[in-house]
Amino acid sequence: DAGVTQSPTHLIKTRGQQVTLRCSPISGHKSVSWYQQVLGQGPQFIFQYYEKEERGRGNFPDRFSARQFPNYSSELNVNALLLGDSALYLCASSPARSLQGQYFGPGTRLLVL
Amino acid sequence: QKEVEQNSGPLSVPEGAIASLNCTYSDRGSQSFFWYRQYSGKSPELIMSIYSNGDKEDGRFTAQLNKASQYVSLLIRDSQPSDSATYLCAVNKNNNDMRFGAGTRLTVKP
């Protein structure tokens, strides 16, 4: 079975631009969560979506938004990019609403210049 | 105080030894606890989960939870060079919020 997939793998943007990151969960998983991981730190929780509704939100500004589609895939959007948004963005899926047993995708590495 | 704290390491152990990784958390209401392994340049991989006080064993890995002390640990027996990675402790505050520690870097020397 395919694991969690994310696209693109790498991305370079300039300050002020907008970016959209995509995630497809493991087949049968209805929950998708997004994390930001800065080098040398653990992942920071951004959002959780379950059954196409936002179920949890971390301490991130409104420049960050996300949505989940009927096929349970998800997009993360970041507007007005800042240099500090440079990070590895991880998507994780789990079968149920709880965040137990999450499986991570390979991540999208974003560099903001 | 950070919500989830881990020693950053690096922790170095010889091959075949026991590696002991520790984690403390601040939210007494936390219900579920996880250990992830992250190789350099890769995404985190779930290796253990624990939900109740005591020990949970899975192969060479043992997770220990003490909710009264707000403490979680991971023991790796018979450490192998392939165990060299960063180990992340994660705490589920409620079903909608997962908090990670900064990770402990483990090096197993042949």
Image (spheres, rainbow, N blue to C red):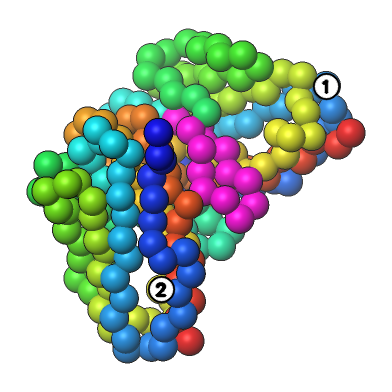
Q: Is residue B11 above or below residue A65?
A: above
Q: State the residue in front, A11 or B59.
A: A11
Q: Residue at x 34, y 81 (%)?
A: A81
Element type at marker 2?
helix
Q: Residue at x 81, y 22 (%)?
A: B17
Q: Is residue B93 visible?
A: no
Locate residue A78: give its quadrant. bottom left
Q: State the residue in front, A7 or B85.
A: A7
Give, as a three-letter code, the residue at label 2.
Asp
Element type at marker 1?
loop
Q: Position of residue A15 (x, y in %)?
A: 38, 88
Q: Which residues are magenta?
A: B34-46
- Residue of label 2: A85
As measured in the structure, the alpha-carbon distance from the residue carrying label 2 to the one carrying label 1 is 41 Å
Q: Position of residue B100 (x, y in %)?
A: 44, 44
Q: Is residue A64 above or below residue A80?
A: above
Q: Please check the rendered image and state whether residue B108 is part of the magenta-colored stretch, yes or no.
A: no
Please indicate whether residue A7 sits to the left or right of residue B76 in the image. Answer: left
Few, some or many C-alpha atoms within 10 Å of disc 2 (few <14, some 14-19, many ≥20)?
some
Q: Residue at x 23, y 74 (%)?
A: A63
- Residue of label 1: B16
Q: State the residue in front, A24 or B84.
A: A24
Few, some or many C-alpha atoms within 10 Å of disc 1 (few <14, some 14-19, many ≥20)?
some
Give, as a three-letter code, the residue at label 1.
Gly
Q: State the residue in front, B102 or A10.
A: A10
* Residue extending furthest toward the front: A1
Q: Is residue B13 visible?
A: yes
Q: Position of residue A87 (x, y in %)?
A: 47, 67
Q: Which chain letter goes with mark 2?
A: A
Q: Residue at x 24, y 61 (%)?
A: A75
Please indicate whether residue A103 sits to the left or right of residue B64 in the image. Answer: left
